[in-house]
Amino acid sequence: MGLTGLEIYKHLPKKNCKECGQPTCLAFAMQIAAGKAGLDACPYVSDEAKELLESASAPPVALVKVGKGEKVLEIGHETVLFRHDKRFEHPCGLAILVEDTLSEDELKDRVEKINKLIFDRVGQLHSVNLVAIKGSSGEAATFAKAVATARAVTDMPFVLIGTPEQLASALETEGANNPLLYAATADNYEQMVELAKKYNVPLAVSAKGLDALADLVQKITSMGYKNLVLDPQPENIYEGLFYQTQIRRQAIKKLFRPFGYPTIAFVLDDNPYQAVLEASVYITKYAGIIVLNTVEPANILPLITLRLNIYTDPQKPIAVEPKVYEILNPGPDAPVFITTNFSLTYFCVAGDVEGARIPAYILPVDTDGTSVLTAWAAGKFTPEKIAQFLNESGIAEKVNHRKAILPGGVAVLSGKLQELSGWEILVGPRESSGINSFIKQRWNA
Ligand code: SF4
């Protein structure tokens, strides 16, 4: 268990200079004890104190990176149990299983399908993150060949699942790409740690239940290796939820170091509904990586959407860039819709405009990513701001009219906006679903 705030405070410089971002050294010590600040924020801590406090100031859940380059997956570094307490830092990685018993063509085909699991959600591209290659053949050469075959068709990070011999063989070519090795167990951990150390790659630690897992992690960390991912081997989803919750709770609330690592969970049920359901539980609480056995987009899309919802920073609404958006190649006569730059608001308007086959311009005013009525109530969607955007966005050069459509919910702004902007302001429907009939009745009239 970590040190208390007062114990940490004893070793701080007690200058109360605020350079760490906290009002006093004591406040800083409390933040460290809660795992919400790192010791390196104070420039005056002595080397002796640093060494002493290192374990207390380490984040409650370590950061682990799998893969390299643009597609590197970062997991861990979490500081809260509940998203609304602050935010979750790193979305869990979704891995898709591939077995080395597939033929070369089948394996390539499956990995290519995994490559294509990319979805556009509220203007952002989201995808699965890893390929999990399992050495079901039991043979080192077969496994190494499967890993090389998969690498030829994807740049995604790998989870390599096999015996130490299989992993050693695959690492000769794949070691430089920082794969996650699965897994060190009570029987093989010394061999696995040597392999992980040799290639400096993350290592999954797998043991049945929390006590056995904590024991095994302690044995491995005492060998000097801490680049770990935890697997408590649940028998079913109920046990999985319990283990995941306990691991996160012990790491964050008790600073119990053996559980201060991200986790991996396997969801391999043949029934796709059950698999999606179980994976949803793990996305919510608290898997770092979830291994699935499906390449069906219909199974992956709900998980990607849920992950996006859970891992969106609640303090920062998702926003689109405030600029002129062109829908269906609009011409100079096309209508101009004003809205706000909250992503959901913008995409509702854009979807309804596109669905009605209306070539149009949409101008999402910068309201810090808040919706129309919220922005209006907060003074972020004002006639002055909208008029400025109308006049500076460049829309005047694209159309041969000066008419813009304001959301019906803020009709009260129309008079002042018309006066300030010099544009004729039409009060549009309250909901974007009314855009089609509004255009037929009012724009084309
Ligand atoms: Fe104290 Fe260091 Fe923070 Fe200054 S920067 S207030 S010395 S903890």
Image (cartoon, helix red, strand yellow):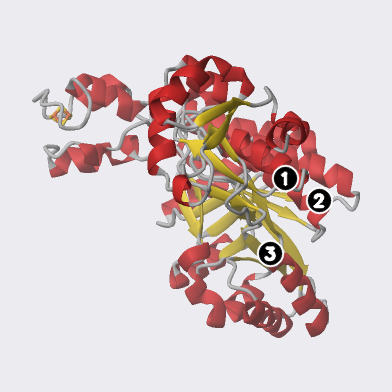
Give the mark nearer the N terminus: 3 vs 2: 3
How far from the left and from the top, in percent, is residue 324? 50, 47
Assess whether mark 1 and mark 3 are in contact (beta carbons under 8 angstroms). no
Where is mark 3, residue-wise? 132
> Compared to 369, does 117 lie above or below?
below
Q: Secondary structure at mark 3?
A: strand
How far from the left and from the top, in percent, is residue 317? 51, 32
- Marks 1 and 2 sit apart, C-alpha to C-alpha, by 7 Å
Where is mark 2, residue-wise? 299
Q: Amino acid at mark 3?
A: Ala
Q: Is the residue indicated by label 2 positioned so its CB lies within 8 Å of ligand 1? A: no
Q: Amino acid at mark 1?
A: Leu
- Marks 3 and 2 sit apart, C-alpha to C-alpha, by 17 Å
Q: Secondary structure at mark 2?
A: helix
Q: Quadrant of ligand 1?
A: top left
Say which quadrant the C terminus sits in.
top right
Give residue 15's quadrant in the image. Answer: top left
Check the image and name the residue furthest to the right: 271
| Mark 3 burial class by Cα count in 10 Å: few <14, some 14-19, many 20+ | many
- Residue closer to the observer: 280 or 427: 427
Give the mark nearer the N terminus: 3 vs 1: 3
